[in-house]
Amino acid sequence: MIEVKPIQQHQVEQAKQIVTAVCLEIWQGILTEQDLRRYDSMSDIENVQTHYFDNSGTFLVLVDADQVVGTGAIRKLNDEICELKRMWFLKAYRGQGLGWKMAQLLCGFAKQAGYRKIRLDLANEERQPEALKLYRKLSFYPIERYNDSPCQVFMEKLLDIEIR
């Protein structure tokens, strides 16, 4: 049975492996695993309790038969705005509505935590077309750059707008 639940400490390494695998898939032929490790230490996942749970956020995992197959998180930017982070699913688990379910749970968490807006960034439209389609369907809209990441797509969602 596939479930979405808060990450446990023993799942941290599996979560990091998911992020690595999907990033390398997206940036195939451009980014090596060594490049990725230089760019992203994944210290937020390594310190998931303090980075997310103790800081008005959450980190969820998609689990299939005790194996982590997807991730998603909410990270505090300020008292009113949070960020959707680390939304990665192995290829075999995409296109089944699981990303939709994870995003709804994360948006629900953010709303209950008192955030008014959720932001996110994506590498670019060409490399993540399905993710962009999902976020548009979830009522995210384009905004100006809000961070110094190498991403090219920046989006936001008002939390008082219901998901259709």
Image (cartoon, helix red, strand yellow):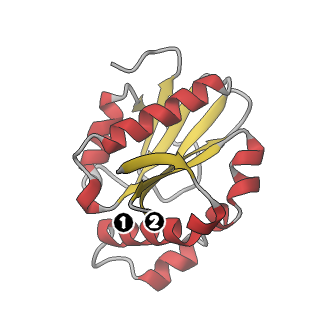
- Residue wearing tag 2: 19
Decide: marks 2, 1 in contact (CB < 8 A)? yes
Judging from the image, what secondary structure is the residue with disc 1 in? helix
Residue at 42 percent across and 41 percent down: it is 102
Q: On screen, 108 above or below 61?
A: above
Q: Is residue 37 visible?
A: yes
Residue 65 falls in image quadrant: bottom left
Q: Amino acid at mark 1?
A: Val
- Front in this rendered view, residue 138 or 150: 138
Judging from the image, what secondary structure is the residue with disc 2 in? helix
- Front in this rendered view, residue 90 or 85: 90
Q: On screen, 16 above or below 100?
A: below
Quadrant containing the C terminus in the rendered view: top left
The x and y percentages for residue 106 are: 51, 36
The x and y percentages for residue 133 are: 26, 38
Residue at 24 percent across and 54 percent down: it is 126
